[in-house]
Amino acid sequence: MKRLSGPVKAGLIAASLAILLVVIGILRGNVPLNPLSILLALLIGGGSWGVVVWAIATAALDVEHDIAEEERGGVEGG
């Protein structure tokens, strides 16, 4: 876990929380109890939230790097 970047960690945490919420939904009876429905619910819930949070965190990190580089004078304003 130490070797993962911040955005990847954030995406994994969000995916884990989403999967937990999906499992709670399954236990409450909101998902039909056939294996395909359960698998799709887990993939859609965990996968979509994990990817969305990873993308946002990556974009934020890129902006922070660009701002830091600009403050150092590495990027010329166009």
Image: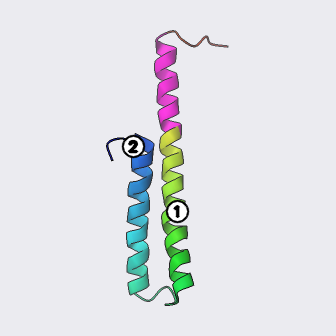
Q: Magenta segment: does it hold 64?
A: yes
Residue lying at the far left of the rendered structure: 2
What residue is at 46 percent from the left and 11 percent from the top? 72
**Cβ atoms under marks 1 and 2 closer than 8 Å:** no
Residue 4: assigned label: 2
Q: Percent from the top left, x then y, of residue 77?
A: 62, 13
User: Disc 1 marks which amino acid?
Assistant: Gly
What residue is at 48 percent from the left and 65 percent from the top? 46
Instruction: Give SS at disc 2.
Output: loop
Q: Which residues are magenta?
A: 59-72
User: Which of label 1 and label 2 is nearer to you?
Assistant: 2
C-alpha span from label 1 to label 2? 18 Å
Q: Magenta segment: does it hold 23?
A: no
Report the side of 41 relative to 22 (left or right).
right
Q: Dot 2 surroundings within 10 Å: few (below 14), some, or many (20 or more)?
A: few
Q: Dot 1 surroundings within 10 Å: few (below 14), some, or many (20 or more)?
A: some
Residue lying at the far right of the rendered structure: 78
What residue is at 49 percent from the left and 22 percent from the top? 67
User: Disc 2 marks which amino acid?
Assistant: Leu
* Above or below: residue 73 compared with residue 30: above
Q: Percent from the top left, x then y, of residue 19?
A: 42, 69
* Above or below: residue 75 compared with residue 58: above
Dot 1 or dot 2: first in sequence order is: 2
Most common secondary structure along the magenta stretch: helix
What residue is at 50 percent from the left and 60 percent from the top? 49
Quarter of the figure that contains the C terminus: top right
Residue 47: assigned label: 1
Q: Nearer the viewer, residue 8 or 14?
A: 8
* Above or below: residue 40 compared with residue 27: above
Q: Quadrant of residue 2?
A: top left
Q: Percent from the top left, x then y, of residue 43?
A: 53, 69
